[in-house]
């Protein structure tokens, strides 16, 4: 079974490179890539990734993790 990964990162070139490297490894499947947080919650619930890779600071994101 592949580990399903969701990527949320506003740096598009980093996303492309990261997804490319993950796709080369058969253990992983990138289930979504988002460049902002606007649709993040919906994608997380719809795709149920095993792992989320999220940028620490993203313009426009005003939610706080506690």
Image (cartoon, rainbow, N blue to C red):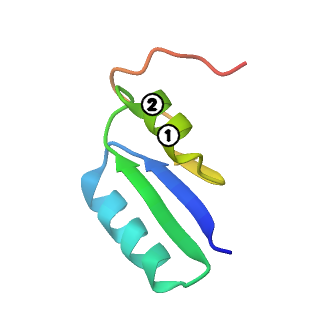
* Relative depth, front residue between 56 and 19: 19
- Residue at the spot 59% in from the left edge and 17% down from the top edge: 64
- Residue 3 left/right relative to 5: right
Q: Which quadrant would the N terminus be assigned to in this image?
A: bottom right
Residue 35, relative to residue 42: is it above or below?
below
- Residue 50 left/right relative to 45: right
- Residue at the spot 66% in from the left edge and 22% down from the top edge: 65
Q: How many marks?
A: 2
Residue 39 is situated, as x and y percent measured from the top left of the image, at 37, 30
Residue 7 is situated, as x and y percent measured from the top left of the image, at 46, 51
Residue furthest to the left in view is 13
Residue furthest to the right in view is 66
* Relative depth, front residue between 24 and 45: 45
The tag on residue 29 is: none
The tag on residue 42 is: 2
Residue 60, relative to residue 41: is it above or below?
above
- Residue at the spot 39% in from the left edge and 45% down from the top edge: 9
Q: Which quadrant would the C terminus be assigned to in this image?
A: top right
Q: CA distance from mark 2 to mark 1?
A: 6 Å
> Mark 1: which secondary structure?
helix
* Label pair 2/1, CB-CB below 8 angstroms: yes
- Residue at the spot 33% in from the left edge and 34% down from the top edge: 36
* Relative depth, front residue between 2 and 24: 2
* Relative depth, front residue between 42 and 34: 42
> Mark 2: which secondary structure?
helix
Q: Label 1: few (<14), some or many (≥20) within 10 Å?
A: few
Residue 25 is situated, as x and y percent measured from the top left of the image, at 53, 84
The tag on residue 46 is: 1
- Residue 63 left/right relative to 60: right
Residue 17 is situated, as x and y percent measured from the top left of the image, at 34, 70
Residue 35, relative to residue 24: is it above or below?
above
């Amino acid at each position: 079974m592949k580990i399903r990964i969701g990527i949320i990162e506003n740096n598009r070139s980093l996303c492309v490179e990261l997804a490319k490297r993950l796709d080369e490894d058969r253990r992983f499947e990138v289930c979504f890539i988002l460049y902002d947080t606007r649709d993040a919650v919906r994608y997380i619930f719809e795709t149920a990734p095993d792992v989320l890779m999220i940028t620490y600071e993203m313009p426009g994101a005003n939610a706080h993790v506690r």
